[in-house]
Image (tube, helix red, strand yellow):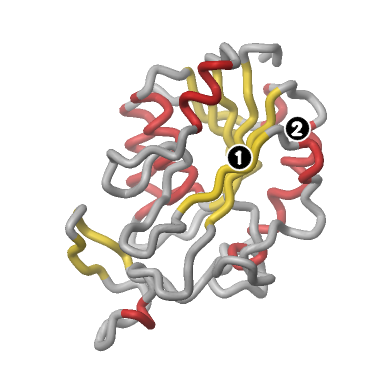
C-alpha cells in the first residue's frame, strides 16, 4: 500500500488517560505509540485527534448522580455510555502520551468539548450532525484515503472510520496500531460494522 499526497494518517486519541495508569485506560494502549510514530514519518498529511472535555461534561458518571461508570443512559441524541472522568481540558490525562511524536502533525482536532454532547468520531459529535470540520480540511487538501490508528478500536476509532466511509473516503484501519476496550461485546460489534462499510482492516506491515 503506497502513501502519497491523497493519503492521510489519522491518529486517534493517544492520550494519557487512555493509556496504562490513566483514568480510562485501554489495556496495552501505549503499545500503539511506536506504531504511530513510525507511520507518521511516511505521510504528508498527519492529523491527531484529542478528547477535550470540560469538567461538567454530561457523559461523566460523576455528573449523573445514581449512575455508575459504564452504565447506559438516554441523551437527547440517543444512548450514551457514562464514563469515568477523563481527558479534562488542560489536565495531564488529556495530554498526548509523552512519547507520541506530535510535531509531525499538520492538524490537531479537539472533540467532546461541548458539555451537553459526547464525541467519539473525528468527524461528528454523537448527534451525528455537529461536525468537527475535519472532512472539509481533508477535502481542501484533496485527500481521498485515510489510514487510521489509535484508541480505542471499538469506540473512537470505530466511529471515526465508519463516519469517514459514509462521507466517501476510502478507509484502512491498522489493527496493530489500535487497542480496544471491548465493553460488553463492543469489539465484535465494531468489527462487524467496519466490514459492513467496506473498511479495510490490516496491519502496518501493509504500508
Please tell me the numbered disc located at residue 74. Answer: none
Label 1 secondary element: strand
Give the crowd class for mark 1: few <14, some 14-19, many >=20 residues within 10 Å: many
Label 2 secondary element: helix
Report which quarter residue 68 is drawn in: bottom left
Please tell me the numbered disc located at residue 149. Answer: 1
Report which quarter residue 177 is drawn in: top right
Which residue appears at 34% of the width and 25% of the height? 166
Q: From this view, report whether residue 86 is shown above or below residue 186.
A: below
Please give left or right for residue 170 compared with residue 22 in the image: left
Q: From this view, report whether residue 163 is shown above or below residue 34.
A: above
Which residue appears at 71% of the width and 53% of the height? 31
Please give left or right for residue 54 compared with residue 130 in the image: right
Q: Where residue 63 sits in the image (x, y, percent)?
A: 34, 80
Q: From this view, report whether residue 94 is shown above or below residue 152.
A: below
Q: Where residue 74 sits in the image (x, y, percent)?
A: 18, 64
Residue placed under numbered mark 2 in the picture: 39
**Mark toward the start of the polypeptide (1 vs 2):** 2
> Considering the image in quadrants, where does the N terminus appear?
top right
Please give left or right for residue 26 compared with residue 54 in the image: right
Out of 130 and 27, give the one closest to the viewer: 130
Q: Where residue 194 sits in the image (x, y, percent)?
A: 39, 33
Q: Where residue 203 sits in the image (x, y, percent)?
A: 64, 32
Which residue appears at 40% of the width and 58% of the height? 114
Label pair 1/2, CB-CB below 8 angstroms: yes
State the CA–CA distance, disc 1 to disc 2.
10 Å
Amino acid at each position: 500500500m503506497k502513501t502519497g499526497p491523497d493519503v492521510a494518517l489519522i491518529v486517534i486519541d493517544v492520550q494519557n488517560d487512555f493509556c496504562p495508569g490513566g483514568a480510562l485506560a485501554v489495556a496495552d494502549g501505549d503499545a500503539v505509540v511506536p506504531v504511530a510514530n513510525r507511520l507518521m514519518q511516511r505521510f504528508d498529511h498527519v492529523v491527531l485527534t484529542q478528547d477535550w472535555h470540560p469538567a461538567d461534561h454530561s457523559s461523566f458518571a460523576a455528573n449523573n448522580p445514581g449512575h455508575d461508570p459504564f452504565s447506559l443512559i438516554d441523551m437527547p441524541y440517543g444512548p450514551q455510555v457514562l464514563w469515568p472522568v477523563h481527558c479534562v481540558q488542560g489536565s495531564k490525562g488529556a495530554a498526548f502520551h509523552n512519547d507520541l511524536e506530535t510535531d509531525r502533525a499538520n492538524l490537531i482536532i479537539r472533540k467532546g468539548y461541548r458539555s451537553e454532547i459526547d464525541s467519539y468520531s473525528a468527524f461528528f459529535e454523537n448527534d451525528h450532525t455537529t461536525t468537527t470540520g475535519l472532512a472539509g480540511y481533508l477535502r481542501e487538501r484533496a485527500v481521498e484515503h485515510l489510514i487510521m490508528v489509535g484508541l480505542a478500536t471499538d469506540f473512537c476509532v470505530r466511529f471515526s472510520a465508519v463516519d469517514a466511509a459514509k462521507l466517501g473516503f476510502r478507509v484502512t484501519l491498522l489493527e496493530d496500531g489500535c487497542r480496544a476496550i471491548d465493553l460488553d461485546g463492543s469489539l465484535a460489534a465494531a468489527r462487524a460494522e467496519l466490514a459492513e462499510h467496506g473498511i479495510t482492516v490490516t496491519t502496518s506491515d501493509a504500508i
